Image (spheres, grey):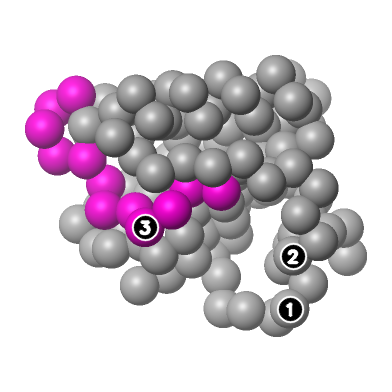
Amino acid sequence: MPTILVDDLRSFTDERAVLVARSGAEGVVLLDRHRGEHIDELWLDHDLGGTDTVWPVVALLERAAFDGEPFSIGTVVVHSANPPGVAALVQALGRWGYRARPAPGVPAVAYR
């Protein structure tokens, strides 16, 4: 039951066990690798450096739900510093039945 973090720069500050993807493409690969497993928490940053965003990950989640096989995720935590991006991610994921909540500026995830 992993926790997955998709963020280009930040990490958890409390040393929890976590699988990390630093780009949208890495996030897709990591989630695909854990398809069929329950993921306790999925932490998403909107902007992943340059023109990269977390939207490829969201597209994978949406497609799985559309196909009737959504990922089993306890909570999706959107911790981006991009308020419009946070709102869009939470809305998109909620529409497909994922429990998503905003958490911008949360101290659990920081630059290390």
Q: CA distance from mark 3 to mark 2?
A: 18 Å
Q: Amino acid at mark 1?
A: Asp
Task: Name the quarter where the C terminus is drawn.
Answer: bottom right
Q: Given the current orientation, which residue lies at the most extreme left position?
A: 68
What residue sits 58% from the left and 32% below the top? 54
- In the displayed structure, would residue 30 be above or below residue 96? below
How many numbered callouts?
A: 3
Residue drawn 73% across and 78% down?
A: 14
Q: Earlier in the sequence, mark 1 or mark 3?
A: 1
| Mark seen at residue 31 | none
The residue segment tinted magenta is: 66-77
Q: Nearer the viewer, residue 106 or 44?
A: 106
State the separation of the CA atoms marked 1 and 2. 7 Å
State if disc 2 and disc 1 touch (CB < 8 Å): yes
The residue lying at 49 percent from left, 53 percent from top is 42
Locate residue 83, reporting x and y percent: 74, 25
Residue type highlighted by circle 3:
Gly
- Are discs 3 and 2 less than 8 Å apart at CB? no
Q: Farthest residue to the right: give it.
A: 112
- Residue 53: which quarter of the image? top right
Point 47% across, 41% down: residue: 100
Is label 2 in a helix, a strand or a loop? Answer: loop
The amino acid beneath tag 2 is: Ala
Q: Position of residue 97 (x, y in %)?
A: 29, 35
Disc 3 residue crowd, few under 14, some 14–19, many 20+, Cα 10 Å: some
Which dot marks residue 74? 3
Name the quadrant of the N terminus: bottom left
* Residue 75 visible in the snapshot: yes
Please report whichever mark, 1 or 2, sits nearer to the chain's N-terminal start: 1
Q: Which mark is residue 14?
A: 1
Residue topped by disc 2? 108
Mark before the other along the chain sequence, 3 or 2: 3
